Amino acid sequence: MVSAILCFLSVDIIGFRAVALILLLVVSLNAILFDIFPVMLSALLSALIWNFFFIPPILTFHIGSPEDALMFLMYFVIASINAVLTYKIREYDKKRRDEEEKANAIKLYNTLLNSLSHELRTPIATIIGAIDTINDGGNKLTDVNRKVLYSEIETAGTRLNRQVENLLSMSRLEAGFIKPKEDWCDLNELIFTTIKRNKENLLNHSIVFTPNEELPLFKLDIGLLEQVVHNIIHNAVQHTPKGSLIKIEAKHAENSCEVIISDNGGGFPIDKMEAVFNKFYRLNNNIGGTGLGLSIVKGFTEAMNGTIHLQNKTNGGAKFTIKIPAETTTIEAYGNQ
C-alpha cells in the first residue's frame, strides 16, 4: 500500500510503465515472506492497482489502448509467474536447509552413539572384570589386590556417573528445563568442593587456588556453577600433559562474580576456539569423552544469564573466564537475617 501511494505521487516523473516494475518487486518480496495464497492475492491486487491508478485513463478499470491492455495482461501473467517461482525457490531452499539439518542431526546422533559405545562400555567392562576377579579369587586375593580392584571399580563407577550426568544435563538443556534455583553461595567453598570432587582426576596435575577472603556471598545456582567449574577442570586435565598446572581465581566484579580457570598446557588452535563449545565436538579424537563437557558449560552459564570467554594465554595454555550476574551480601548481613 505504501509503495502504491509513493508510486502514485511520483508517476508523473517515472511513468506508469516504471510503476509496473516497482509493483513486481513488491510481489517478489511478498513471495519471500508469505505463503502462496497471500502471494497470489498480492499479484492480483497489484495488477488491479496498476490498472486503476496508473494505466490511462486513471481511476477506472477501462484501458484506453490495445497496447496498454496487452501490457496489463502481460503484467498479470509475469506477476503471477514471478510470485509462484519466488515462492517455489523459497520452499526449495527451506527444504534443502531442513535436509541439511536432518543430516547434521543424524551425524551428531551417530557421533554420540560412537562415543557412548566406548565411554560407557569401558567402565562397565572394568567393573564387571574386577567383580569377576574378586568372585573367582575368593580368599586367594591379598588385601592389597582386593583394594586395587575396589579402586578400579570406584574409578570406573565415577567415570560412568560423569557420562550419565553429562547426558542428563544435555537433555535438560535441549528440553529447556534448566531453571536456575538461586541461593546464597560462598564461592570459595564452592571451588574447594569442586576441587575435592575432582581429586581422583588431579592425581597427575597440580592445582592452585588461593581463597579470596574479600568475596561477598553471591546469590546464584550453586549446582549449575559447580558443574561448570567441574567440567572445565576435567577438560583441562584431559587436554594437558601430566604435571601441568591448573590455576583457579575467584573475583567480585560489578554486580557479578567471576571464576577464572587457566592452565599451562598447549592451549587451543585459534580456528577451533568457537567450535569447542559445540555439542559432541572433540578437539582430539584420541582422547575419550562424549564432547558434551564444554557444551554443557556454555549452556549452564547462559542459563544463569552469564557469559564464558575462552582465550589462549600469551605464555602458553588456555584461560576460561566465567562471569555470572549475581546479587551480593556480606557474611555478617546474611547471619543477621
Image (cartoon, rainbow, N blue to C red):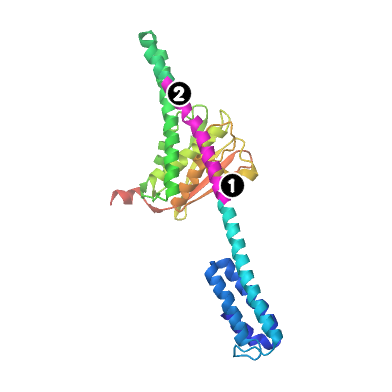
The location of residue 225, given as percent across then percent down, is: 43, 44
Q: Which residue is mark 2?
A: 125
Q: Is residue 125 magenta?
A: yes
Find residue 274 and name its label.
1
Q: Given this view, does label 2 or label 1 mark the residue nearer the observer?
A: 2
User: What amino acid does circle 1 point to?
Assistant: Glu
Evaluate if marks 2 and 1 touch, with contact meaning CB atoms under 8 Å apart.
Answer: no
Q: Residue at x 49, y 34 (%)?
A: 116
For mark 2, give the secondary structure.
helix
CA neighbours of label 1 inside 10 A, class few (<14), some (14 to 19), many (20+): few
Task: Name above or below for residue 253 compared with residue 10.
Answer: above
User: What amino acid does circle 2 point to?
Assistant: Ala
Main SS of the magenta part reads helix
- Which numbered disc, 2 or 1, marks the residue that appears first in the sequence? 2
CA neighbours of label 2 inside 10 A, class few (<14), some (14 to 19), many (20+): few
For mark 1, give the secondary structure.
loop
Q: Which residues are magenta?
A: 99-128
Compare residues 225 and 205 and report the one nearer the observer: 225
Measure the alpha-carbon separation of dots 2 and 1: 35 Å
